Amino acid sequence: MQWPPPWRRSPLVSATPPPGPTTGLLRPRRVSEAGDSSTEGARTGHSHYVTPAESAMERRSQPFPSLRPASPTNAPAHGRGSDCTAKEPPLANVCRQNYGAAQDPVEPAGRRSASHVTGSSLGKAEVACGRRWRWAELVANSSWSPAGRATEMKVKMLSRNPDNYVRETKLDLQRVPRNYDPALHPFEVPREYVRALNATKLERVFAKPFLASLDGHRDGVNCLAKHPENLATVLSGACDGEVRIWNLTQRNCIRTIQAHEGFVRGICTRFCGTSFFTVGDDKTVKQWKMDGPGYGDEEEPLHTILGKTVYTGIDHHWKEAVFATCGQQVDIWDEQRTNPICSMTWGFDSISSVKFNPIETFLLGSCASDRNIVLYDMRQATPLKKVILDMRTNTICWNPMEAFIFTAANEDYNLYTFDMRALDTPVMVHMDHVSAVLDVDYSPTGKEFVSASFDKSIRIFPVDKSRSREVYHTKRMQHVICVKWTSDSKYIMCGSDEMNIRLWKANASEKLGVLTSREKAAKDYNQKLKEKFQHYPHIKRIARHRHLPKSIYSQIQEQRIMKEARRRKEVNRIKHSKPGSVPIVSEKKKHVVAVVK
């Protein structure tokens, strides 16, 4: 078999070598050359020489070899009488079939490329290669160049800069690239909703707020006080005149004092924590050391002040050696004197509670049995203003973060948050209790407060919400007289009639102890999810549901019916009266009678 085959031989080679020395290449003659030439060498089929210039021109003129296997139909044999030039297909079709695009190789004038796809088989080849044609049309500039036979392609380089994902130091946070395009995350909201729903359910599953019960008193607990510097120390006063000091870490009593005869009406600690003061029904004010007496020493107070009337409350200044008592009047005392510095009164009824402002320390407020809340300025030794409510206020508490805000616990089952600059309208009315509210105390953050009620429960209210976010109760707990929020904002203490002090978690489902970094991250993530989906009906229903004692639940239903009846009566009165004759009063202003300055 001769190589190259006859149909691949170039028509550019002359039959005889050019004159001159034979420096070319020796190769056999082609059939086409033999048919065209009439020389003796052509007839005999002898080899001839090709010069380098002819060889280069031949290479440039030849098309790229076909990748398809040769077949008898595609490549007819010479010598059977077949005419090659008559059966040559169009040049553009052959090039498109072989290389994906029409090409026009450079040829001498009067010559055509020797392609041997017959006319009968050309249609079959075009149909078979139609898929290759379509692919070739999509790929731009992918055909072979007839001159240089070079391939042109588009290359997309991958570039990765280590500065985008490598930390500079091991203390830096890991850089996590993420595309926040919503189109790439179509199921992000449904996935987060399911996570928020599960987090809300787990919060209710792990809601176990009760921690401990401190028992030891022989009568109901009437008052509580916190140590200003030690979180684990708590003081309590009972109705039998006994004062106990508790260690919350060990959950036991570390000291017992028989302070008064009769009730312990009030107890407070000095701002430095070295001593504390108590008042009782025996008309005395006593100062005690925080540390117990030495071995063999008797328990005696540091100072004793005998008053003329019964003292019902006491509170100490936040920065100075001054304290205030209340009874028939408000008295300001110096610790080194047995007579009050000044006495302030406004009205003739007894005063049940007095509290110093923790920020503006020269201001103090009191509440009296004649339904008044009176504000005093210690620098002027005179009352500033007072607000009169529908019913009596039992106690007040100042916001530790906002100097002008205080909350009053009232007998009408509500709590009222006032701004002392505008007492005519309360900032917020907090409604959820079903009996008189006896005590209130703020969280150190100033964002929440806890209330104790005669309905045997305590509730936690956000400052800016009218409804409570949490309610705590037990089967044994009776009327709650006093309540305190610890200084680390994590625990709540309450004292009740059945002689127990109970310790609760401020967040019912909070995990106690040291949390790992992953637990903290999961906690924060779940909290944000619950805040994001808190208004969805299913999540909202689960989050706000609380089990209540039957007595409280039935009273809530009864009060709801009564409130609806009052509202319906008011609407009917306005409907059947002359327009403008019946004023419309908001819920906030209904309970304020007057403001006196």
Image (cartoon, rainbow, N blue to C red):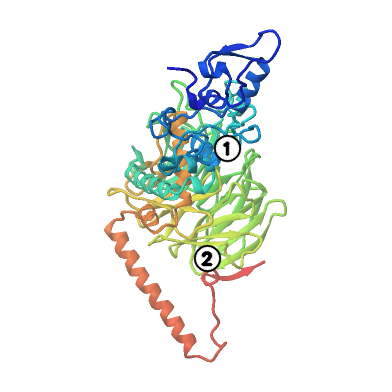
Q: Residue 490, position in %: x, y?
A: 46, 39
Q: In which quarter of the image is the N terminus?
A: top left
Closer to the N terminus: mark 2 or mark 1? 1
Name the foreground residue: 1 vs 446.
1
Q: Residues within 10 Å of mark 2 (few under 14, many from 20)?
A: many
Name the foreground residue: 215 vs 49.
49
Q: Is mark 1 on a helix, strand or loop?
A: loop
Residue 368 sits above or below residue 16 on the image: below
Residue 375 as seen in the image, left or right of residue 519: right
Q: Mark 1 points at which residue?
A: 270
Q: Mark 2 points at which residue?
A: 371
Name the foreground residue: 178 vs 511.
178
Measured Cα–Cα span from mark 2 to mark 1: 30 Å
Q: Residues within 10 Å of mark 1 (few under 14, many from 20)?
A: many
- Is residue 287 something that shows in the picture? no
Q: What residue is drawn where x is 31% and y is 54%?
A: 547
- Identified by mark 1, the residue type is Arg
Q: Residue 394, position in %: x, y?
A: 48, 58
Q: Quadrant of the C terminus?
A: bottom right
Q: What residue is drawn where x is 55% and y is 34%?
A: 177
Residue 196 as seen in the image, left or right of residue 175: left
Name the foreground residue: 179 vs 488.
179
- Looking at the rendered structure, which numbered label has been put on residue 320? none
- Is residue 381 something that shows in the picture? yes
Residue 25 as seen in the image, left or right of residue 286: right
Q: What residue is drawn where x is 44% and y is 65%?
A: 412
- Identified by mark 2, the residue type is Arg
Residue 512 sits above or below residue 575 on the image: above
Residue 194 sits above or below residue 368 on the image: above
Count the numbered circles shown: 2
Q: Is mark 2 on a helix, strand or loop?
A: loop
Q: Residue 108, position in %: x, y?
A: 65, 32
